[in-house]
Image (spheres, grey):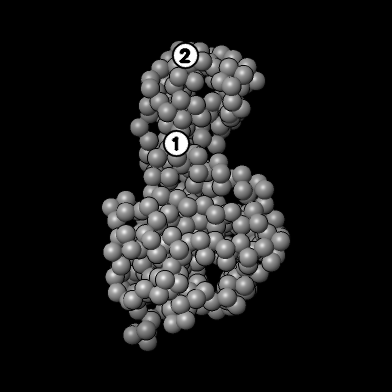
Amino acid sequence: MSNPKLSQFRRIVVKVGSSLLIDAAAGEVRASWLAALAADIAKLHNEGKDVLVVSSGSIALGRSRLKLPGGTLKLEESQAAAAVGQIALARIWSEVLGDHGIGAGQILVTLQDTEERRRYLNARSTITKLLEWRAVPVINENDTVATNEIRYGDNDRLAARVATMTSSDLLVLLSDIDGLYTAPPGTNPNAKLIPVVNAVTADIEAMAGAAESELSRGGMRTKIEAAKIATSSGTHMLIASGKIEHPLKAIADGGPCTWFLTPANPVTARKRWIAGSLEPKGTLTIDAGAVTALRAGKSLLPAGIIRVDGQFARGDAVVVRGPDMHEIGRGLVAYDADDAEKIKGRSSSDAAQILGISGRAEMIHRDDLVVGGQRGADGGR
Ligand code: GLU
């Protein structure tokens, strides 16, 4: 299979590491490099693609602005440094994207925001809305509240979670190295760049373990972890050097990089993930008309629901049953059990009136629904 081209993707997450963004000696952002990257992002954006940025740098920038001495920071010190750095980082992104007439929207997430279903749905709605408004979400971990026990720690895996959360079709990790090598390229003259990885095997993991990479937290190992998350959920990933100016243009022009290809298409993989990874918290029993609609690929509306069982919250996984109690599928529900009970059997406009809010029209959106037969035999992620 020939490698994909940047131009064929519709939603791209670009992860930028601290060591690229911040000039450690000067303690400041590498402004001209960042301006060139912003020009690349603007080009993709103007071609109609959705672009999301995952930007590190809050702690490094805060540290230099506060003129903190070298050495390891204690937890509260790195949290406080991040508070100073993040505000500066947000301003810089806003300016460089603003120069191209693009609005930047800051999103700071914690681990729970992607691992708890309800919060996951919530974060996803916000990001999706920003994209709909043609803004560029600029995302980082909320380092001011993240603790050592509960945090991503590295933005490689965070970026992969963001990419799968938003059904992005490509994740670009800009690194200080242009891809995965067979051996550490600095010390081994026979080391070769691997242009394509079709599956993250034990051999590939071993190469990552050996390869020397970034100064920042990531390194190659978390990039391989990111590749596993991305490719098993339908997102292609690539690692390329961010040390050059216009790194995205270089990729588009066929410059060196390592592609990690996903075997699946995004929707199928996401649905496998829904079906395979969650404990159902309740059951929705639906009428025959709704069964037909679901099998035809439609969303589940409140009108088709005849019975609600279980104590579930918005975003939890539930089982959907037909009138004969046969399981039709599973999905992530958009309302909690109490609200679902109130609006079952009602039209979507009645539902909005009953709840006094204008929530989602669907009880389960078809993107969040796996109808029997679509569930992967392997359970997916
Ligand atoms: N969230 C951290 C920061 O912005 C960076 C984590 C990483 O280097 O991957 O400073």
Q: Which mark is residue 288?
A: none
Residue visible at 45% across and 72% down? 65
Q: Is residue 34 above or below residue 299?
A: below
Residue visible at 38% across and 20% down? 310
Local SS, label 2: strand
Q: Amino acid at mark 2?
A: Arg
Q: Which residue is mark 1?
A: 118
Q: Is residue 254 above or below residue 320?
A: below
Q: Find the distance from the CA under tag 1 to the CA under tag 2.
A: 22 Å
Residue visible at 67% across and 48% down? 133
Number of residues whose C-alpha sits closer than 10 Å to that of mark 2, classed few (under 14), some (14–19) or many (20 or more):
some
Residue visible at 36% across and 67% down? 217
| Comes first in the chain, label 1 or label 2 | 1
Q: Residue 361 sits in which quadrant? A: top right
Q: Which residue is mark 2?
A: 307
Q: Is residue 191 visible?
A: yes
Q: Quadrant of the N terminus?
A: bottom right
